[in-house]
Amino acid sequence: MFTDVVILAGGFGERLWPASSSENPKQFMTVSDNVSFLQLAVIRALSLKPEGKILIVTRRDIYKTVSLHCKNLLPDMSEDNKKKIKDDLYILPETEPKHTTAPIILACNFLNLTDYADGNREHSVLVLTSDHIIKPIENFILDCKKACAAAANGKFVCFAIPPLEPATGYGYIKIGKAEGDSVFAIEKFVEKPDLKTATEYVKSGKYRWNSGMFGFTCKTLLKEIKEHQNDAYAAFENLLSGNKPKIGVVNGIKYVSSWPEMDAAYSKVPAVAIDKSVAEKTKNACAVSSSFNWDDIGSWDAFEKLFDKNPGETIEIESKDNFVYSDIPVALCGVEDLVVVIKNGKALIVKKGKSSLVRDAVKQMKNSNV
């Protein structure tokens, strides 16, 4: 299994406004049983029983909230998992958001500060998102084992999700010939398609959704970065030759409190997605076609499906098929097929099936200083 897990938790999540915002992004939203997306990601990482570290790379302005979510997991954890969180979970607050290549390089360099006792084993890394839904966990673990085996052979592994519908909000991966159990060569990556193209992809049976989760060894990743995105590699080249990061503790959770070399690297590194810097360029990419169910919950229509009933206090009179997610009691009269969200002092009312318009609304509100 992968020795280490990296959770990317630096997003802004405006598609789920107003519950999600730059100050209180999607990964902190509660989804069920009073557990947040981020907490589910940590639980997912723990289920793999990594012998090394669990790193959460996040924005500097929200790292304390990240630590609280980790701390709040402890009371319900087994003793082994409590120890793992206290001993081996680290928060890495980025100097500034720089997409996904920079935090992944940062994490690999941080892991390379720690050598295993036998002195021979490489760090193998699983990169997870902090705000997706994955189940069942048993299938996820099995697929991670397959990915780890491929990564051990120098592969850059992508987790590819069999599409359930012709979604236009995801990138796609066209898979090629089989290279192992549920492991396939990658013919190409494609950007988010229009509906007609997405429908053709699904009918062909050759395309998968790109989940944004990856597996590799640190050695492979840094080699690929050096070859395909050398300016990013060069920015971090002196990271380990200077002072080591200072480790602090906040809310009982370890974090990097100071690392001038990281700040210097971030001042130079370009903001580029790992898909663009490595995945689409390397000859060593492969895909594990997942057996688990996956959803990035990128809209209120998707978020509603996580609940059997409205999670808040709601009264409905001559109303039906509405979803309410609110801090305060809500009464609905004579309406149907609405999503009503009242969070953080703001309100959203959108017809079901139209939640893709939320980003446009957020943009207009920003432009109008509302």
Image: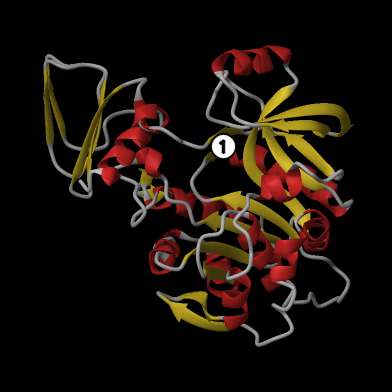
State which quadrant residue 206 falls in: top right
User: What is the total number of numbered labels drawn onto the structure image?
Assistant: 1
Q: List x then y, in percent, for residue 254.
A: 51, 76
Q: Is residue 185 left or right of residue 99?
A: right
Which quarter shows the N terminus?
Answer: bottom right
Q: Is mark 1 on a helix, strand or loop?
A: strand
- Asked if residue 257 is positioned above or below residue 296 in the image, the reply reads below
Residue extending furthest toward the front: 367
Q: List x then y, in percent, for residue 252.
A: 44, 76
Residue displayed at 85% across by 53% down: 152
- Asked if residue 33 is positioned above or below residue 196 in the image, the reply reads below
* Colouring chosen for the image of the structure: secondary structure
Residue displayed at 28% across by 46% down: 366
* Disc 1 packing (10 Å; few <14; some 14–19; many ≥20): some
Q: Can residue 83 be seen in this view?
A: yes
Q: List x then y, in percent, for residue 129.
A: 56, 49
Residue underneath mark 1: 135
The kind of residue tagged 1 is: Lys
Q: List x then y, in percent, for residue 306.
A: 40, 33
State which quadrant residue 101 falls in: bottom right
Return the residue nearer the eye: 308 or 207.
207
Q: In this view, does 303 lie to the left or right of 86?
A: left
Return the residue nearer the eye: 230 or 173.
230
Q: Can residue 1 be seen in this view?
A: no
Q: In this view, does 288 lie to the left or right of 343?
A: right
Residue displayed at 63% across by 31% down: 191
